Image: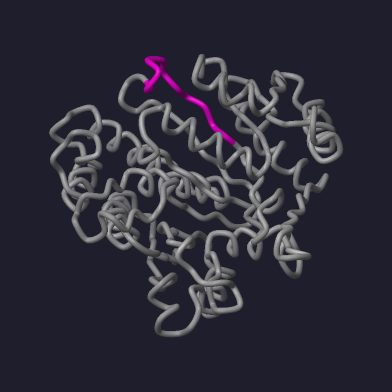
Amino acid sequence: MKLLVLPGDGIGPEITDATLGVLDRANALYKLGLEWQLEQIGLGPLKSEGTTLPERVMEAARTAPGIILGPVSHLDYPPREQGGINPSGELRVKLDLFANIRPAKSRLGVGLTGKPVDLVIFRECTEGFYADRNMFFGRGEFMPTPDLALAVRKVSARQCERISRVAFEWARKRRKKVTAVHKANVLHLSDGLFLREVRKVAKDYPDVELDEKIVDAMAALLVRNPTQFDCIVTGNMFGDILSDEASEISGSLGLAGSTMAGDDACCAQAQHGSAPDIQGQDKANPTSLLLSAAMLFAWLAARHQRAEFELAAQRIEAAIDAALQKPETRTPDLGGKLGTRAFGRHVAGTLG
């Protein structure tokens, strides 16, 4: 099995190298039979080939059983017509990776509010207000005049049903509660449609509690008492914002894994950005991408009925948690002294 590896921009290559070191060790220990196909995306290919996402990379992505995607500096990209394609958004749409799954867990004991966090946010990530991915052709925002900008929000029953079902399936294996986050009091039609589909799916899971929260109240409740939440399902923009909030409350955005999953493909992606201010300094914390890769392994285990991938995922997560318990085996952002490479070597060395 050959996985596609896209290091990205900024600290992307550094944390990807550290991640691959751990995965190489897991590959050998658990006999996973993995190979890596390394391809470049982002600012490098933009300079050399005129695009941030060469077509050969998309072709490789279409056939890869899984993808590991480093952070990208898409805010620094030129317009799409000048080659500035956001790889993350493009992969989501072209590969139908509709489910952005983002766990938030207090790996350092308690979160920033003094309360433990253990929840998962399920974000539909191909629609909503995100103009670079919500249209079949063109963009979902436009300017009729120089002083007027309009944005279109796309919400379909199909994608609402799909992301809801993923959330309920996870909840059934966790604490059996789903919270649907919306703004139906203002967005009557689009979020009304979202809630209709969530409630419809809920009928298939009588053993799972359905809760509903307005998004602004939800933002406050995550701070006040995150322990009341288990699985949270919502749309693109709300999910993007709330997942960053939940991850930071849990301890740090740098400790949050993330996958973009569809029915037939899955991509591991760090939750954080490319951090060009610390690029090349061996300071970046690779934990987010490592946990994302572990989530990818768990997805591959379920998709291909490969129990060894699930075991590898569990061991990687356990090794990371063990490293984070000791200040001397943490990275500088968490008060430790281990650099990116050293942290990766330590995690790999404790797998077995």
Q: Residue at x 62, y 27 (%)?
A: 171
Using residue 33 as the reference point, say whether residue 284 is left or right of it. left
* Residue 105 placement: quadrant: top left
The residue at the far front in this view is 147
Q: Residue at x 41, y 47 (%)?
A: 272
* Magenta-tinted stretch: 111-121
Q: Position of residue 317 (x, y in %)?
A: 35, 37
Using residue 265 as the reference point, say whether residue 187 is left or right of it. right
289 or 295, nearer to the observer:
289
156 or 10, nearer to the observer:
10
Q: Inspect the magenta stretch and tell me whether residue 116 lies in it.
A: yes
289 or 141, nearer to the observer:
141
Q: Relative to 241, is 148 above or below? A: below
Q: Which quarter of the figure is the C terminus placed in? A: top left
Q: Position of residue 61 (x, y in %)?
A: 54, 68
Q: Inspect the magenta stretch and tell me whether residue 232 lies in it.
A: no
Q: Residue at x 33, y 49 (%)?
A: 30
**Total number of numbered labels?**
0
Q: How is the image coloured?
A: one colour
Using residue 334 as the reference point, say whether residue 105 is left or right of it. right
Q: Residue at x 33, y 41 (%)?
A: 316
Q: Which quarter of the figure is the N terminus placed in? A: bottom left
105 or 248, nearer to the observer:
248
Q: Position of residue 158 (x, y in %)?
A: 80, 47
Q: Position of residue 94 (x, y in %)?
A: 65, 65
Q: Main secondary structure of the magenta part?
A: loop
